[in-house]
Amino acid sequence: MRSGALDQRPLRTSGFTFIELSIYVVLSALVMTVVVQFMINQSQAYTQEVQIMDARETVRSAAALMTWEFRGLSSAAGDLYTIKSDTVALRSSMATGIICAKADTIAHYGVSGRTGQIFTTANDSAMVYLPGLEDWVELDVTDQFDPIGSTVPYCDWGDGATTRPDLVVEMAGDTTGIQVGTPWTAFRRVEFGIYQDGGRWWLGRKVGNAGSYEKLTGPLVSPSDGGFVLTYLDDTGTATADPTAVEQVQIEIRSESTGMDRGQARQDSIQFTVWLRG
Amino acid sequence: MSTLIDRVRAHWEARDGFAMPVVLLALAVMTSVAVAALTTATDEQKSARAVREGGRAFYTAEAGLWESWANWPADSVVSDIAQGESLDLGWKTLDNGGEYRGEIFRWGPSTFGLMVESRGAGPLGGQQWLSLLVNYEASVGIGRCCEAAALVDGEVMFEADDDFILGQDAYPAGWEAAGVCTNGLEDKPGLIMKDSTQLINEDDGVLSGVPALVEDTTISEATFNDFGDKTWADLKAQANFSVGEMNGGESVYPQASVNGSGECQTSDQENWGSNDPNHPCFDYFPIILIRGDVNARDYYGQGIIILDWDEATQQGSEIDLEDGMVFNGIILGKGCIEVQRGSVLNGAAFVDGNYFNEDLCDPDKALDINENGKVQYSGCAIERAIEGAGLEGFGQTGAGYKPLATRAFAQLPR
């Protein structure tokens, strides 16, 4: 019977011959070598890609930050304190708003339409625009409160006290002339610059009179290799050292990756110009 | 009985070696690496695109900001915005597909904010918010007449401690209740002078404002002749009537009067309007040309007083407000002003003392305050006087809506 013959065949095939085994080993070694090499190459490419992205993200974030800071400045109004090729000290805008109410007997002011964050440290100040003076006047911000339960719980827009301020600030200085409708801006003195930490170079900032830099982004290449270079131009496009004459700032940023590839950091760079619009 | 499935299973179970698992493992590893690389590349592309679209949104907002500014609505529309309220300009689309929405806020009587939010055209649709602070310099002004309680080129004197020049904005008595002062108060400097050493304060007269005193060395003869596209002669020609003669003297006792029909009698040259909201002359604001030395006494007037001058002798005129006289409006021109004996000017004074007439003014100064005289800045009195007199077209060059000279632009964090 046919089926009986099939049943009598051994279930396991016979073993490999030496030649078969040799070929198998050689082919396996070749395949494994190719696979491993491919994986090594992929790993290196991936590492390089990560490092390139790291360097690229650094220049992007640095560029976005410096662009934001410079755009709103008014050099004519004294917003640039000191200008150097690798550092700049400026009046950094932290928040804006409109005075919508004021207390009767104390320098508490309701702020409406607030954007940004407000701080009340010694490094913080505010400016109010007085139409009668046609200029901004600087004051200190000494405290801030929730409008509910404060001295100015409602805006004084003449709408029957139905609108609450976004917050209430206490200011010190000559507050004469501040009225409902006065534009208000909060500032910090901030110095941006390149500094060294842990053998690498970083973009950092000093808020107020801080003695050391606070790390923002990096690493950058060294200043001598053009890690962070600022060039200040006046309205004719000529380089200027006068902070009140600056109309545009050329910024060059060269970053490098945090990690190394065979002892070499990947680099990226960006060069752009920001016009001061304030 | 062995089935076909059993036989296939037995056949596979009889297989030895590890090539297949190795190949599958390698494929899995390579697939993981490829997926990771693809994901990374996709993230990188998205990141780059987000940055690009964020930048595009900023430029959309900036273009929208300046387009909105270029198409700033008519004054009649903007001036109707109540303080604290806004006017939505609606969404608009730029040629590149970016969209922006402008909104005009009225923060103060003359302070406005143009806010623009934008949406980028791409799928990641970056958003940005920009603002432009705009100041309104009254196009209804008469030159620089109303930048302070008093703007003077020449000597200013306080003779006693009960004399006042006040820049803090105030409503004339009864006008707020009458509903004619709706734009809010906005303090101004008390006194703007070309040369602050010409301020003589003999006995602690009160000078206050925001700030109290401003020295403006740019003030010149041209300052008092700049009425936009109009001239001094144009302004003078607007006068309803003149009082006095050059180098002569005259006293008037202004009082509102009505004709037989009960209407404001504008032909009466001693009718200088009424302070009573129920009087027919409440909205009558004459333009009065003063020639020589004119004393306005005892009663009430409103409108515009122009101090004339003689081109041949280069000498101006003098107006004295005295004996409790109250004038709501503007006094401007060439010569001198004296406010004394309990009299009050609510509004603004704008006088060029270079045409000081020694025969008329001496010993008074270009602006002389004595015996409880007061010059009180009043934006409402100024506005009503100019509108009532029909002198809206005499604003200084460049008047109207203008971005603040500094820090007008802001990129707003959200």
Image (tube, coloured by chain):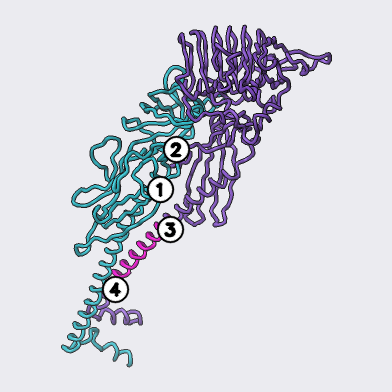
Q: Are marks 3 and 4 on the same chain?
A: yes
Q: Main structural element of the magenta stretch: helix, strand or loop?
A: helix
Q: Do labels 1 and 4 share a chain?
A: no
Q: Name the residue under label 3.
A: B49
The label number, if any, that marks residue B24 in the structure image: 4
Question: Mark 2–mark 4 contact, CB under 8 Å?
Answer: no
- Residue B173 shown left or right of residue B59 in the figure: right
Q: Looking at the picture, tell me which residue is in the foreground, B134 or A78.
A: A78
Of all chains, the one bearing label 1 is A
Q: Looking at the picture, tell me which residue is in the foreground, A233 or A205.
A: A233
Mark yes or no: residue B397 visible.
Answer: yes
Q: Looking at the picture, tell me which residue is in the foreground, B151 or A122.
A: B151
Q: Name the residue under label 2.
A: A115
Q: Name the residue under label 1.
A: A248
Q: Are marks 3 and 2 on the same chain?
A: no
Of all chains, the one bearing label 2 is A
CA–CA distance between discs 3 and 2? 26 Å
Circle 1 Cα neighbour tier, 10 Å, few/some/many (<14 / 14–19 / ≥20): many
Q: Give the range drawn in magenta.
A: B25-50
Q: Which amino acid does label 2 sit on?
A: Thr
Mark yes or no: residue A15 visible.
Answer: no
Question: Mark 1–mark 4 contact, CB under 8 Å?
Answer: no
Q: Which residue is drawn at 50% across and 23% down?
A: B193
Q: Determine the colour of chain A.
A: cyan
